[in-house]
Amino acid sequence: MQIDKLRGKQLDQLFDAMLTLKNREECYRFFDDIATMNEVQSLAQRLHVAKMLDEGQTYTAIAKESSASTTTISRVKRCLAYGNDGYRIVLDRLKEDEQQE
């Protein structure tokens, strides 16, 4: 894992902090304080791209809807195919939540 290079007390603290958030509003407040608008937008865009790739959308459709570059789309696709299943965990859980609603 690439993130292993960053593994340590500070990153553990960040992840532990994120795990304490109880709802969407708390997430908005935390991310507003901790990240720039561009950082938050980039993270949200990557997740949206992952969801669209998972649904079988084409690069053209994804680029048009998400405004993501083909480089970003390719990077996300590579993570979906060869990554550490982080996207897969989240996408599957989001699908489960949607089905329960």
Image (cartoon, rainbow, N blue to C red):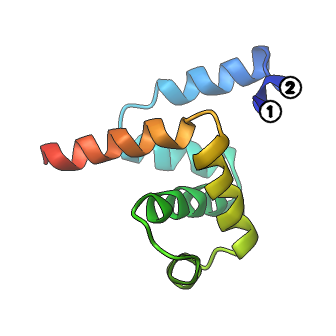
Q: Which residue is mark 2?
A: 5
* Residue 38 placement (x, y as % from top left): 70, 64
Q: Nearer the viewer, residue 92 or 8?
A: 92
Position above or below: 7 against 26: above
* Residue 71 placement (x, y as % from top left): 75, 69
Quarter of the image with the N terminus in it = top right
Q: Residue at x 66, y 42 (%)?
A: 82
Position above or below: 85 against 31: above
* Residue 88 placement (x, y as % from top left): 47, 41
Q: Residue at x 83, y 26 (%)?
A: 6
Marker disc for residue 53: none
As helix, strand or loop, the secondary structure at mark 2 comes to: helix
**Amino acid type of the residue that numbered disc 2 sits on in the rendered structure:** Lys
* Residue 32 placement (x, y as % from top left): 59, 52
Q: Residue at x 44, y 57 (%)?
A: 54
Q: Are marks 2 and 1 in contact (CB under 8 Å)?
A: yes
Q: Residue at x 45, y 72 (%)?
A: 57
Q: Which residue is mark 1?
A: 2
- Whether residue 83 sits left or right of residue 22 in the image: it is right
Q: Nearer the viewer, residue 64 or 23?
A: 64
- Whether residue 56 sits left or right of residue 4 in the image: it is left
As helix, strand or loop, the secondary structure at mark 1 comes to: helix
Q: Most extreme residue toward the right, as rendered?
A: 5
Q: Nearer the viewer, residue 33 or 41?
A: 41
